[in-house]
């Protein structure tokens, strides 16, 4: 549990007095108290309780605390070694099943999932939208009926008006919906699941696609703004759960009620100057507003600007006046963006999948993969991870040389609120996608950035070294021979420096059909400073079924057998080949080792 706390997966640790007495030293942050009191104090909606103990005992402890499906926290039970993770309560709506899978991957354990949707590989209709950054609405009875119809094998009618549709390609989604009815927009019966901004008592998921433009008098009351927004949404038949944010003129950037509303709802606010607003065509311009603000529109123009070029005005401006003890006045307009915007919910996980064998995939990477709703990467790398992909997780294959496109798409989805895994082979931070993704992420304003995490992976040079002994025991470097992104003159300068500095050298991207001479030139440069007998490791398809590892020397290395699936390790002046192993001593001759 302390490990999970360090990784910020646990906010607070608590022990019973008896358990605390077994500690040599009790941390100050540790809560000590009877289990029933600790559970009662932390029993709240949207909370998560991780309990180490016997399921029977935990069941008896929580039984008196149960309130209802939408008011109870997620309760997850772990054994003392973290080998079994059981979502006991709140499997879907409170997210217990999803968290259990992530914890099991993190701890190297097993998630014990007994829910119908998971055991039958069905899409968890009442929770899957969380992974895409959507918010849910609809009556409990309707959701219960929807889940019952799904469990009985009935085909459902879907109507999706906004948000990413990649989830529809998953194996879990394919078995749920009436594809013909969905495609043809069957109007004979209402959709049983709606995805879009419309407000409905039926089961709905709402991507964050609505922008609310607000103009208001100075010191307008917060209650007036809240009432005005609710009234505008209701009149337009739109759901508050679909709101992406607020927009106004920059002269309102310090308006207390406007900022308070945004904070209370966790909505970002975009402010525009009068010149930008004046360029937007609106249906109801106002000369009075132009005289006061320097633009004929604030609410409508701001809503449309926030929604970008392809935004659509769904609700023209409405003016709301103060009532009772309120003061001020507010103008409200609502637009819909072409793409959702919820970066505060989105996550971009840069994952190094290792050389290929799933045995080399880190627990950290497994947990991130389990958390992500969609995996983005080059097809070969996704294929290697395919055994870990659940039926409810989407994959988006990209072309080998289109790294920037993959990064942009992954970042776009994360900005919409989705949890996205962007996958590289080896380590994402070593000739992988992490650098390019981070550069693109940094071009966004801080408020528009989704969460960004790099998860380390096992690099090919590490596995190649492990397979042949210990060639990296002294200073080493890696050089990519691909001149697609780096001029060959720069690569040659680095090779000369590595050769003269007597580094052990790892060569990535050593040879392709179009680049068939660079490897020979690299060997020539190294031979200027190293003996022809210097050991060379040629490792191809590491961690895969076709793995082939050969030991050669600089003089005998078969250049024509090397390709882009190969990594080459070249020893330094002290490296030696002996009994089919390569070793580089930790020190040079005459050096004393501590």
Image (cartoon, helix red, strand yellow):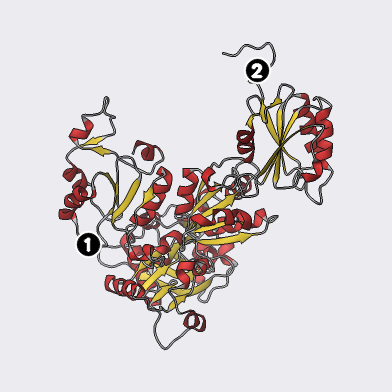
> Could you tell me which residue is drawn at 17 percent across and 49 percent down?
61
Q: Position of residue 86 (x, y in %)?
A: 31, 52
Mark 1 falls on what kind of element?
loop
Is 327 on the left-hand or right-hand side of 516?
left
Q: Nearer the viewer, residue 309 or 74?
A: 74
| Circle 1 residues within 10 Å: few <14, some 14–19, many ≥20 | few
Q: Quadrant of residue 225?
A: bottom left
Is 282 on the left-hand or right-hand side of 317?
right
Asked whether residue 250 appears in the rendered view, the answer is no
Q: Position of residue 535 (x, y in %)?
A: 74, 29
| Circle 2 residues within 10 Å: few <14, some 14–19, many ≥20 | few
Q: Position of residue 63 (x, y in %)?
A: 17, 55
Q: Nearer the viewer, residue 62 or 210?
A: 62
> Tag on residue 143?
none
> Could you tell me which residue is drawn at 19 percent across and 59 percent down?
67
Q: Earlier in the sequence, mark 1 or mark 2?
A: 1
Q: Which residue is mark 1?
A: 68
Q: Quadrant of the C terminus?
A: top right
Asked whether residue 230 appears in the rendered view, the answer is yes
Q: Quadrant of the N terminus?
A: top left
Q: Quadrant of residue 241?
A: bottom left
Above or below, 263 against 288 in this view is above
Q: How many marks?
A: 2
Q: Which residue is mark 2?
A: 587
Q: Quadrant of residue 504?
A: top right
Is 471 on the left-hand or right-hand side of 249?
right
Question: Are discs 1 and 2 less than 8 Å apart at CB?
Answer: no
Above or below, 577 against 129 in this view is above
Q: Position of residue 574 (x, y in %)?
A: 71, 21
Mark 2 falls on what kind of element?
loop
């Amino acid at each position: 549990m302390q490990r999970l706390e360090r990784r910020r997966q646990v906010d607070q640790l608590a022990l019973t007095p008896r358990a605390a007495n077994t500690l040599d030293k009790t941390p100050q942050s540790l809560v000590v108290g009877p289990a029933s009191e600790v559970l009662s104090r932390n029993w709240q909606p949207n909370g998560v309780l991780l309990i180490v103990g016997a399921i029977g005992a935990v069941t008896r402890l929580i039984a008196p605390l149960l309130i209802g499906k939408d008011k109870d926290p997620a309760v997850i039970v772990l054994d003392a070694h973290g080998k079994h993770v059981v979502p006991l309560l709140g499997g879907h709506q409170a997210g217990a099943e999803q968290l259990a899978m992530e914890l099991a991957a993190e701890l190297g354990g097993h998630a014990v999932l007994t829910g119908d949707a998971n055991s039958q590989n069905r899409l968890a209709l009442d929770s899957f939208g969380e992974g895409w950054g959507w918010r849910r609405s609809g009556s409990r009875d309707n959701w219960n009926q929807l889940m019952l119809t799904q469990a009985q094998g009935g085909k459902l009618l879907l109507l999706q008006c906004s948000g990413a549709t990649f989830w529809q390609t998953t194996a879990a989604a394919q078995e749920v919906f009436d594809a013909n009815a969905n495609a043809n927009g069957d109007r004979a019966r209402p959709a049983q699941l709606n995805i879009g901004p419309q407000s409905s008592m039926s089961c709905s998921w709402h991507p964050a696609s609505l922008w609310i433009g607000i103009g208001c008098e100075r010191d307008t009351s917060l209650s007036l703004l809240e009432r005005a927004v609710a009234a505008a949404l209701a009149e337009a038949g739109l759901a508050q759960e679909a709101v992406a944010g607020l927009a106004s003129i920059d002269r309102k950037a310090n308006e207390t009620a406007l900022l308070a509303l945004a904070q209370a709802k966790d909505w970002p606010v975009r402010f525009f100057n009068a010149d930008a607003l004046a360029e937007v065509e609106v249906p109801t311009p106002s000369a009075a507003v132009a005289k006061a603000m320097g633009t004929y529109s604030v609410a409508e123009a701001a809503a449309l600007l926030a929604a970008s070029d392809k935004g659509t005005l769904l609700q023209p401006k409405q003016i709301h006046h103060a009532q009772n003890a309120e003061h001020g006045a507010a103008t409200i307009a609502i637009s819909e963006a072409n793409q959702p915007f919820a970066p505060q919910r989105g996550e971009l996980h840069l994952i190094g999948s290792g050389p290929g064998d799933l045995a080399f995939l880190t627990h950290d990477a497994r947990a991130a993969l389990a958390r992500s709703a969609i995996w983005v990467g080059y097809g070969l790398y996704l294929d290697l991870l395919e055994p870990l992909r659940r039926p409810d997780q989407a994959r988006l294959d990209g072309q080998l040389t289109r790294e920037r496109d993959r990064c942009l798409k992954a970042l776009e989805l994360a900005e919409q609120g989705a949890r996205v895994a962007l996958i590289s082979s080896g380590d994402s931070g070593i000739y992988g996608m992490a650098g390019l993704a981070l550069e693109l992420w940094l071009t966004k304003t801080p408020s528009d950035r989704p969460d960004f995490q790099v998860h380390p992976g096992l690099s090919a040079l590490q596995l190649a070294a492990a397979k042949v002994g210990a060639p990296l025991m002294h200073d080493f470097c890696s050089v990519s021979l691909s001149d697609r992104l780096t001029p060959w003159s720069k690569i040659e300068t680095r090779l000369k420096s590595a050769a003269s500095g007597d580094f052990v050298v790892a060569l990535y991207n050593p040879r392709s059909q179009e680049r068939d001479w660079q490897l020979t030139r690299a060997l020539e440069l190294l031979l200027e400073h190293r003996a022809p007998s210097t050991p060379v490791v040629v490792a191809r398809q590491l961690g895969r079924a076709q793995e082939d590892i050969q030991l050669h020397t600089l003089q005998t290395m078969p250049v024509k057998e090397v390709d882009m699936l190969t990594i080459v390790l070249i020893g330094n002046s002290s490296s030696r080949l002996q009994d089919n192993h390569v070793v580089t001593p930790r020190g040079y001759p005459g050096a004393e080792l501590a």
